[in-house]
Amino acid sequence: MIVDVYAERKKKQVMRETFGHLAPKEGRTYKGYMIWAYGRWGDIILLEAAFENLNDSPWLFEAMQEHVGEHLNGEGIYKWEGHFSKIEEGSYCFGGKIKRLDFKDIFQVKQGT
């Protein structure tokens, strides 16, 4: 089996060259929100997110997924509002509040029909 010892380095280089202009800037803070659902079988679905002066990027998506995964509190739909910042390469910080949205009446399904 042949292994490319530079594969990870090459991957990071291609990511920077392709999407680097979209990456969060180190030391800058972005105000925003995220809405996600956590399902009965453990599936996490990011439904919506927006941050002021920050475009979507692979780094932002990865940071959001990690943040959501650290704050799971039972199935439901949640909203986080606050600020996001890049501390250093590969390290991100989220500050703000998470609240569970009450959609049970909207999504209630009649049993037995």
Image (spheres, rainbow, N blue to C red):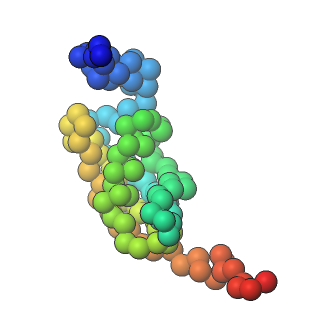
Describe residue 87's horizontal placement relative to residue 57 as left or right. left
Residue at image x 42%, y 35%?
A: 58
Residue at image x 35%, y 58%?
A: 69
Describe residue 63's horizontal placement relative to residue 37 as left or right. left
Residue 73, placed above or below residue 15: below
The answer to whether residue 27 of the structure is visible from this angle is no
Quadrant of res 97? bottom left
Residue 110, placed above or below residue 28: below
Quarter placement of the C terminus = bottom right
Residue 85, x across and y down, in percent: 29, 46
Residue at image x 20%, y 37%?
A: 88
Residue 5, x across and y down, in percent: 23, 16
Question: In the current view of this chain or complex, which residue is farthest to the front?
Answer: 1
Describe residue 107's horizontal placement relative to residue 39 as left or right. right
| Total numbered labels | 0
Residue at image x 23%, y 42%?
A: 91
Residue 66, x across and y down, in percent: 34, 51
Q: Nearer the viewer, residue 100 or 53?
A: 100
